[in-house]
Amino acid sequence: MTDEPVGRSTNGSVTDAEPSYIDYETFLDPAFSPTSFANSLVLATNNPSDTPLDLATPLSKVLFDIQEIDTHIHSLATSSALPLINYTKEQDDAAQKIVKELDAQISTLTDGYLRLEKEVIERYETADQVRQTVERLWQTTKIGRAVGRCLLLGRQLEAQMAEISPDGSSKKDGHRAMVRAAATLGNIRELLAASGPGEEAEHLNRINLVTSLQSSLLSPSETALQSRGQQIIREFSMSSLAPTPSGPSTYAQSEDTKARTTSALLTLHLLSPQLQLATLQSYLRTSLTSSLASLTRALTNLPNLDRTLLEVSARCQNIVALESLLESVKPPLQPSPDRANDGRQSPNFLEPLLASLDTPSLPSYFWRSLAEGLASRVSELISKGGATARTLRSQKERVKGSIRDCVIRGSQGPAGGRGREGAWEREAAVMVGSVVGALGR
């Protein structure tokens, strides 16, 4: 450290006129290190080889320097007090002027905001409340309209169901009410299915009246329509060979049967195309099962063969009549919920059934399926031997002719018209082969 004299100017700055023992350049150096400075003081006042170090001398030096700096600061503050006060006053006066100007501007901004709040914000809040009210009113109106439409359709369905007598015997044109009821039921189901955001029935599932309508009217009506339609299909019969208590059916009765069956087909299709298809397949399976069982019994008791074959022919005539009816009925234009969206609609009810059975015609399916089941039954009878096998072999030609006549009769329509041209010849050969083939072995 160098103790060079330093002076002060009149405004308090350090000058060379006054003596000072403080080396300001050392303390103001950016690279100044307190530890290095303390170490240099200790080394300057002590011998490095001395065991006890004298720290009093360097500490006194530091304290003296601090006192000198304090005295210097006091002198500067005293000599510069008036300029500092003047400078502060000038700054305060300038600040007051700025504040006065800002107060005017702030007042203007405040007035503008209050006017804006009154003219825009308050009006916006009022308008927003009106918007919310209108939205809720619109939602309420929308729900009310949907509920009203649902109830209107429900009353319409209830009236249509009343036209169908519970015992299955229709009033005049009552079977047509089945179709109308199924269409109405489909409309209600379609309405209730539109429950997505923004759709018509978005909140209907939360309305107790609608849920009560579903459980008390829709489900029972659907069950009743399904049961009635399936019953009509199961009882379908137009054959002129089947004996009836009232004798042969008249033209009016035949037309009524067609009309009732058509209504049943349309009803089941409107409820579900798959339900209609399953009902028709069940009708065919029932005819096949009954025919196979009765033919098997008749082959073990040949005196009953002719009557049994007549019944089988009658069943096939019913199938021919059903095929003709299915081909003439077009599916309704109203879309069904579970219909495959394949971009095309079948021209009639026959095509989907033939496609599901993988057959060119229903009589062909009946005879070939019956022949397939009958072949195994005849083989079992022959393998058991006994009087039944001997009788069958001895009556082989009679059985062959009877079966062929059965196929010919059955392949004709109820009014005597032939089914699909030439189809009975191939099917007759298949049926004869299923029985005679086993008898020839």
Image (tube, helix red, strand yellow):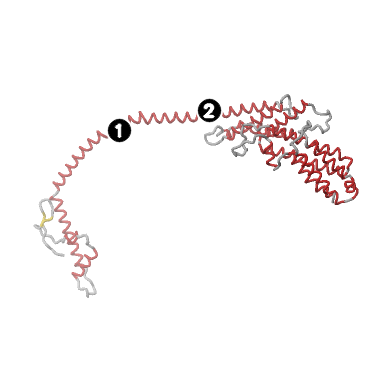
Mark 1 nearby-residue class (10 Å; few <14, some 14–19, many ≥20)? few
Q: Which mark is residue 141?
A: 2
Quarter of the figure with residue 161: top right
Inter-mark Cα distance, 1 to 2:
44 Å
Left or right of 364: which side holds 299? right
The residue type indicated by label 2 comes to: Thr
Q: Judge by depth and name the residue closer to the eye, 208 or 338.
A: 338
Q: What x and y, as percent, mark residue 24? A: 16, 59
Q: Say whether disc 1 or disc 2 marks the residue closer to the N-terminus.
A: 1
Q: Judge by depth and name the residue closer to the eye, 148 or 288.
A: 288
Mark 2 nearby-residue class (10 Å; few <14, some 14–19, many ≥20)? few
Residue placed under numbered mark 1 in the picture: 110
Q: What x and y, as percent, mark residue 347? A: 65, 34
Residue that lies at the very extreme toward the right in this rendered image: 387
Quarter of the figure with residue 374: top right
Q: Nearer the viewer, mark 1 or mark 2?
A: 2
Residue at the spot 83% in from the left edge and 32% down from the top edge: 243
Determine whether the residue tagged by mark 1 lies in a helix, strand or loop: helix
Q: What x and y, as percent, mark residue 433? A: 81, 46
The residue type indicated by label 1 comes to: Thr
